[in-house]
Image (tube, grey):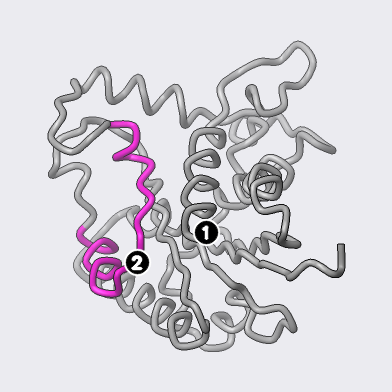
Amino acid sequence: SSMRPIFTIGVVGGSMTAGSMNCHAMAGVMCRGKFSRHELSWSKQLQMRLAPVLPACDLRVNLQATPANRIDIMLDAVKRAQLLNHDSPNPDDMLIEDFTVNDNKGVTNTTVERVQAGMETLLRHELARQSRPQLIHLDTWPPIVSCEEDVLHDPAHVPIAKHYAVPVLSFRRALCGRPGTITSREGARAAWQAAWLAGCGSLNAPINYSTHSRGRNRTQRASQWVSKIHS
């Protein structure tokens, strides 16, 4: 209803944020309609799951994905304004940032510095712009080869998130369990494969084609976080 206040969640990230792994895109099998990449992207699924939880709001999830880019794209003022929805009459009330898959590929000291500069630029602009800043950093970097702390530790993003008190929703740590628990390498790998494999899966399974969906668990946890923060 137009009488309900609009609540907009902005989502920025790379091609996987836009659902490029869904529908077996990497295997050359492309689905259409409700099985398309866009429809099975986690942001689209988040809106479907979260809207019933916030019936008093006109909930809108605004996806702005930039394939093959890292978060240092935020250092470009023009692109930053486009991605962060600055010119919209309904600016984002919340922002979920999902760049870790691209950020952590081929990490060097130089790329870490640029990633941190890009992340800090994004956070500072959003925190200054929003009347009630609500930000979530999404950590989805695969693969989960083990649950040892030196593997799970993210030296690029976490220090920036902690400095600005931004919540971190970690796909890796969720699979590995509570801090201090011991998960074998085999167990970690099995958990990652069960949750990350590309495909339509049980979210929406095409006829005669069933596989796991990487989006389901992340979407469920994200919707829980967003509903808690908004309440």
Task: State left or right for residue 92 relative to residue 102.
Answer: right
Q: Which residue is drawn at 48% across and 53% down?
A: 228
Res 142 quadrant in image: top left
Task: Report helix, strand or loop for mark 2.
Answer: loop
What's drawn in magenta, residue-wise? Answer: 155-176
**Vertical relation: 29 (above or below) 117:** above
Q: Position of residue 22 (x, y in %)?
A: 63, 36
Q: Where is residue 98 in the image (x, y as percent from the top left)?
A: 47, 57
Q: Where is residue 81 in the image (x, y as percent from the top left)?
A: 59, 84
Res 82 quadrant in image: bottom right
Res 115 quadrant in image: bottom left
Task: State left or right for residue 184 relative to residue 5.
Answer: left
Q: Which residue is drawn at 43% across and 61% down?
A: 136
Are discs 1 and 2 less than 8 Å apart at CB? no
Name the residue beneath numbered marker 2: 166
Task: State left or right for residue 44 relative to residue 228.
Answer: right
Q: Which of 178 and 142 is in front in this view?
A: 178
Q: What residue type is labelled 1?
A: Ser
Q: Which residue is drawn at 42% across and 54% down?
A: 138
Give the CA separation, mark 1 to mark 2.
17 Å
Q: How crowded is mark 1: few (under 14 residues within 10 Å), some or many (20 or more)?
A: few
Q: How crowded is mark 2: few (under 14 residues within 10 Å), some or many (20 or more)?
A: some
Name the residue beneath numbered marker 1: 231
